[in-house]
Image (cartoon, rainbow, N blue to C red):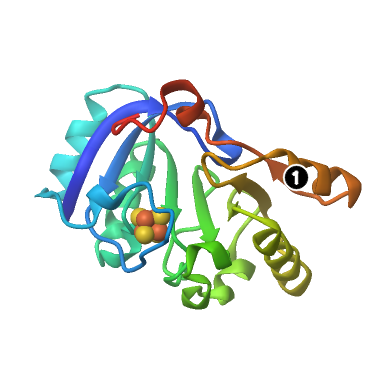
Amino acid sequence: MRINEIFYSIQGEGINIGVPMVFVRVTGCNLRCRWCDTKYAFDEGTEMSIEAIFTKVDEFNVGRVCITGGEPLLYKDITKLLSRFIDAGYFVQLQTNGSRTIQEMPCEENLCISMDIKCPSSGMQDKMEFSNIELLSPFDELKFVIADETDLNYARQVIDKYQPKTNVVFQPVYGTDIKFIADAVVKEELNVRVLPQLHKIIWGEVRGK
Ligand code: SF4
């Protein structure tokens, strides 16, 4: 498995926002979102075994890990990596871009699958695996990254159509307005959470944070 970076920070997105954890960023992504903030993960990386990844993460001694990318589900060994951490008692978060099936993923209370649905501003909305939505549990989350009213309407339509039984997060693209999203959620009494990217508020667009 090629690994782009391993670092310790706080979770800046979604339902675990603010929680300290170790991040394992895999190399490679099958999408090309217009506003991608991790292009450095497309090609750069070092080959590591599952045991070497586990050992490196375990040195931080925090018991929580986020597997991100790039796109982790491009690697066939990803379930083995998740199981290595779960079996060791870790809380594990898996961030996936929504384009690959999650049906092989373990269903565990200490595994949070954080799945994106890419909205039109990304240019990648036609690449989504919508059948994943019904596989998400109450421990997981479905995240819409929203840039404008078109994205907001799209998110509404996806929710209406698929009726997710998991946590739903609306997150503005970094640098865009969050208020129009919050206003719509309050006005329409939408059952979603509106959250910024906390790590970027704290540190800006800095790699490894
Ligand atoms: S899925 Fe993530 S890593 Fe891939 S292009 Fe989109 S934002 Fe970048």
Q: Secondary structure at mark 1?
A: helix
Note whether 138 is above or below 183 in the view shown.
below
Q: Residue at x 24, y 62 (%)?
A: 77
Q: Which residue type carries mark 1?
A: Phe
Query: Could you tell whether 59 is left or right of 196 in the image?
Result: left
Name which quarter of the figure residue 149 lies in. Answer: bottom right
Note whether 126 is above or below 122 in the view shown.
below
The quarter of the image holding the N terminus is bottom left
Residue 129 appears in the picture as rendered: yes
- Looking at the image, which is closer to me, 15 or 61? 15
Q: Which residue does the numbered mark 1 point to in the structure image?
A: 180
Furthest toward the left, the residue is: 47
> What x and y, as percent, mark residue 126?
51, 78
- Looking at the image, which is closer to me, 166 or 27? 27
- Looking at the image, which is closer to me, 165 or 127? 127
> What x and y, as percent, mark residue 37?
37, 47
